[in-house]
Image (cartoon, rainbow, N blue to C red):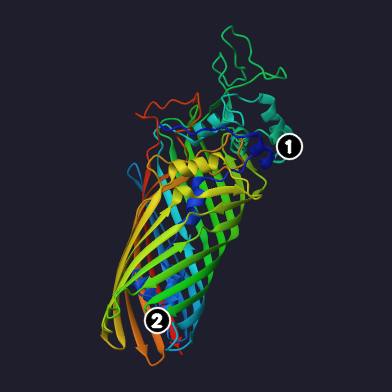
Amino acid sequence: MKTKSIFMSTVAVCLFGATALAQTQYDAARLVDTDLNGTARFVGMGGAMSALGGEISTMGSNPAGIGLFRSNDISGSISLSDTRAECDFDGMIGKENRSRMSFDQLGVVFSNKIGNETSVRYVNIGVNYRKQRNFSRRMAMYGNLLGMSLTDQIANMTNHDPYGNYNPLPLDDYYKVYNDLKGNYYGEAWSDLSWLGVLGIQGGLIGPQIGPDGEDGDEPLVDGDGQPITDVNGRPLYEYKHYIGMPGYETEYRSRETGGVNVFDINMSTNINDRIYLGLTVGFHDVNYKRSSAYTEWGEFDGTPTDFTLSNDFVTEGTGVNAKLGAIFRPFEESAFRMGLAIHTPTLYKLSDRHWASLSSSLDNYFGETDIAEFDYELVTPWKFNLSLGHTIGTSVALGAEYEYTDYSSSELRYDDGYEMGEENDWIDEDLKGVHTFRIGAEVKLIPEFSLRAGYNYSSAAFEKSAYKWLYPNTTRTDAEYENMLARNTFTLGMGFRTGQFYVDAAFQYTHQKSEFYPFDSQFSYDDALVEYPTSADGLLPATRMDNERSQLLLTVGYRF
């Protein structure tokens, strides 16, 4: 079992203002990842057009591709997407799907001929809107927790101080909140408490250790001599145990994700002697992500049927900017063979997270909800490197291939003043890794007016197999779930029709990606973990095996002039 360091510096505590709304490696990876999207021609060829160029979507992969335009071009694209998620948790199957229309691309290229006798033949300018990431998805998982429970994690968080040390806080800290504040989540007594822990206490999910008479009690911790252990103010400390999570406990988790990352690209490119093409793209990113989820457990406590539901809403909004430099070379004057190279700078995101939660519990006939926690921060994504090859055979066949590398582990989280986060970046470095992407594509013109296209993409997994989400013991975050995405495969088909200056392209893509989902962290990663699992050999919750599928029909209409 892997253990993460849980030291939090004094500076970090001050920046958080006592409680911590900690970002995670999962928040970073969500914005580093990209989808295959753009015009239908680009998608139909699997995006493998970075060296071929002459296609408006290449300004987002290799900006030099715009340098191959010899006329003006305007195009727009819409799509219909269907996203399916099938979850298998210990043989229990949950299926969900979501379909939606989307406006995916709108752009224009202005081609400016300089002359045939000058070295610089064309200077082209392009502007393009594209949807870089589509978060739309529903999922559902069901199953038997093998004697484990989210309340186990809540109890362990509650028994540790804000620095992760085993040091249960005084009982009256929690009951002051429970009796006096009643949902004032910014009161003084919340400064060292886990919001998830307080919801658990208020809902009757966890409580003081069982007393010597076998009844629910408030027996304080004692040392080897049987003397009560107290804090610096002489108040007794209490160990918290979970009340529910009996063997055979059942669970259900449902979530709905919406939003996306939209990018506005501005490009300038040149054609030098019809042999060298150079380009620069500046991209402006707009982020909008929302996840709503509900986690429920059912079972018995002291022979009485019990249940609780934890509902979470999580929102990320913000903006970002990056640049892309690209070059395409035609090394042999008499050959159409081309080689491409592109470098994408890190994207600097300015982001704001908002989070709130509610808990209903039959144990205490309780319903409570938190205030909205909001945190501003920065994310710096990794550098991206793209190598590509392209070749045309006459005017009838176009072939493309490319390789792209992105080191997800070099992502960096910062506070809104630019100060680097410590532990969060350590988790990124430990749990994320370099991603290799391969693309191939082909286009064949059956007749001058009609083309067929096909492509394939493969992207390796971004997460280490042992990755998991660790929550600070005093975090305001109450979303314990996490998902480790595995390798992704995408297959594409397309066709195009051209008549005069007008063209219409259509494409279909199918993407399949497996993942491993966990509704909470059964590793806990705290010293002196309190919970033993009699029905699990290694003490870990089995992964929910997920099949994520996305089908997209894309239509592009364009005009060259």
What's under tag 1, amino acid-wise? Leu
Dot 2 falls on a residue whose secondary structure is loop
Q: Residue at x 55, y 43 (%)?
A: 310
Eye-nearest disc, 1 or 2: 2
Residue at 62% from the left image edge and 38% from the top image edge: 195
Classed neighbour count for the residue bearing mark 1: other residues with Cα under 10 Å, few (<14), some (14–19), many (≥20): some
Say whether residue 60 is left or right of residue 368: left
Q: Position of residue 120 (x, y in %)?
A: 46, 82
Farthest top residue in view: 225
Frontmost residue, 442 versus 205: 442
What whole-number distance in Å separates the C-alpha atoms at marks 1 and 2?
74 Å
Q: Residues within 10 Å of mark 2 (few under 14, many from 20)?
A: some
Q: Position of residue 300 (x, y in %)?
A: 48, 32
Q: Residue tagged by mark 1?
A: 181
Q: Is residue 211 left or right of residue 253?
A: right
Of 229 and 58, the residue lying toward us? 58
408 in relation to 322, above or below:
above
Amino acid at the residue labelled 2: Asn
The numbered mark at residue 273 is 2
Up-down relation of residue 323 to residue 272 (above or below)? above
Q: Secondary structure at mark 1?
A: helix
Q: Residue at image x 55%, y 64%?
A: 285
Q: Which percent across, then down, holds residue 75? A: 46, 81
Residue 525 placement (x, y as % from top left): 48, 32
The quadrant in which residue 454 appears is: bottom left
